[in-house]
Image (spheres, rainbow, N blue to C red):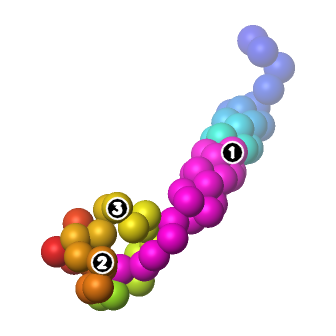
Amino acid sequence: MSGFTDEERAAEMKRRDDAIKLEEEARTAAKRDAELQQADTRCLHCGNPMRSWEATDPENPLCDICL
């Protein structure tokens, strides 16, 4: 027997899962911030930031999703 109750084990597993989720969210946010720093234009329809060479038309830039 490990000496821990089921509730203690469940609480520890939840704490670890929450820590992993927070770390993944921080990593995703950092990646998104890096992409936003490279963006130099926005989609006219949805406002999604993108690089100018990704735009379909320089005068009316639309992202791939809105196209």
Q: Is residue 47 left or right of residue 8?
A: left
Q: Nearer the viewer, mark 2 or mark 1?
A: 2
Of pointers 2 and 1, the one earlier in the residue sequence: 1
Answer with the quarter of the image where residue 8 lies: top right
Answer with the quarter of the image where residue 2 lies: top right
Where is residue 34 drawn, in percent x and y? 61, 55
Question: Which residue lies under the disc numbered 1?
Answer: 23
Which structural element holds mark 1? helix
**In 3D space, how far apart are the residues under numbered discs 3 and 1 (Cα atoms)?**
32 Å
Which structural element holds mark 2? loop
Q: Is residue 29 left or right of residue 51?
A: right
Q: How many marks?
A: 3
Q: Nearer the viewer, residue 42 or 19?
A: 42
Where is residue 4 drawn, in percent x and y? 79, 26
Circle 3 residues within 10 Å: few <14, some 14–19, many ≥20: few
Question: Which residue lies under the disc numbered 2?
Answer: 58
Magenta stretch, main secondary structure, is helix
Decide: is 2 above or below 53. above
**Residue at image coords 30%, 77%:** 58
**Residue at image coords 30%, 69%:** 55
Quarter of the picture containing the N terminus is top right
Q: Is residue 34 left or right of residue 40?
A: right
Residue 18 in sight: no
> Which mark, residue 53?
3
Q: Nearer the viewer, mark 3 or mark 1?
A: 3
The stretch in magenta equals 22-43
Of pointers 2 and 3, the one earlier in the residue sequence: 3
> Which mark, residue 5?
none
Membership of 16 in magenta stretch = no
**Residue at image coords 29%, 85%:** 59
Where is residue 30 drawn, in percent x and y? 66, 53
